[in-house]
Image (spheres, helix red, strand yellow):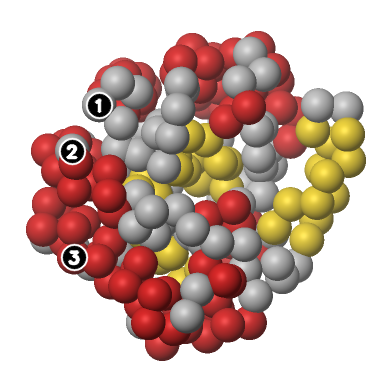
Amino acid sequence: MGALAVALVAGAVVAVPTETAEAAGARGGNVVYLTFDDGPSPTYTPRILSILNRYGVHATFFEIGENVAAHPSLTAQVARQGHSVQNHSWSHPDLRRLSPASFNSQVGDTDRAIRAQTGRTPKCLRPPYGAVNGAVRSRAAALGKEVVLWSVDPADWSRPGAAAIRSRVLRNVRPGSVILLHDGGGDRSQTAAALPDILSTLKARGYGFATLC
């Protein structure tokens, strides 16, 4: 999975990918990069967008192609509100296990679905599960894609509670951090509940927010 860093999450030491965080940190300033995976969701994406709008924060949404196809107006709304919409594959497979043709289909079909709603072709690919190897990297590069991972993972997908999500983000964040959260793929009510405190606290600490890609 490339370069790794060690972070303390929920009392356990875990390895998290750092390539993107390092690149982001090199851009300078107390900037963090908020990212959301697995949407769009008709239940949670509008709630997340409302919170981001309230705090004047822009984020990067890594969207699943089949969800874009099912809820195209939501993808259009994400882009219209100034957020970045990027590629998270069509159906969330482990890209390491796909044939070249299947890989190209997963990425290309998602590109087309997103472009139809935003007018832009995604420049970045976030492999599902963070599952990366040499084949994934080379195939992504052949399609003109930068592989984007993360450096702060509060495991919000496991629904540990809004307080735990908030604490894990704020304890591990630093300038250049790429924060992984979710607006789709299940019940994301805890993520939505934690988000206002995360944003207000980071702003109080002097952080700004930017989009990737």
Mark 3 and mark 2 lie on one chain; the one further toward the N terminus is 2
Residue 110, image x, y percentages: 27, 61
Q: Which residue is mark 2?
A: 71
Disc 3 marks which amino acid? Arg
Q: Amino acid at mark 1?
A: Pro
Q: Give the quarter of the figure containing the N terminus.
A: bottom right
Q: Amino acid at mark 2?
A: His
Residue under the image location 79 percent in, 33 percent down = 9
Q: Residues within 10 Å of mark 3 (few under 14, many from 20)?
A: some
In whole angstroms, how far apart are the C-alphas of marks 1 and 2?
7 Å
Q: Secondary structure at mark 3?
A: helix
Residue 47, image x, y percentages = 31, 19
Which of the numbered marks, if any, corresponds to residue 42? 1
Circle 3 sits on which residue? 112
Q: Earlier in the sequence, mark 1 or mark 3?
A: 1
Of label 1 and label 2, which has the lower sequence position? Answer: 1
Measure how far apart labels 1 and 3 are at the Cα level.
20 Å
Residue 36 vertical position relative to residue 165 in the rendered view, above or below: below
- Rendered image quadrant of residue 132: bottom right
Is disc 1 placed on a helix, strand or loop? loop
| Marks 1 and 2 close (CB-CB < 8 Å) | yes
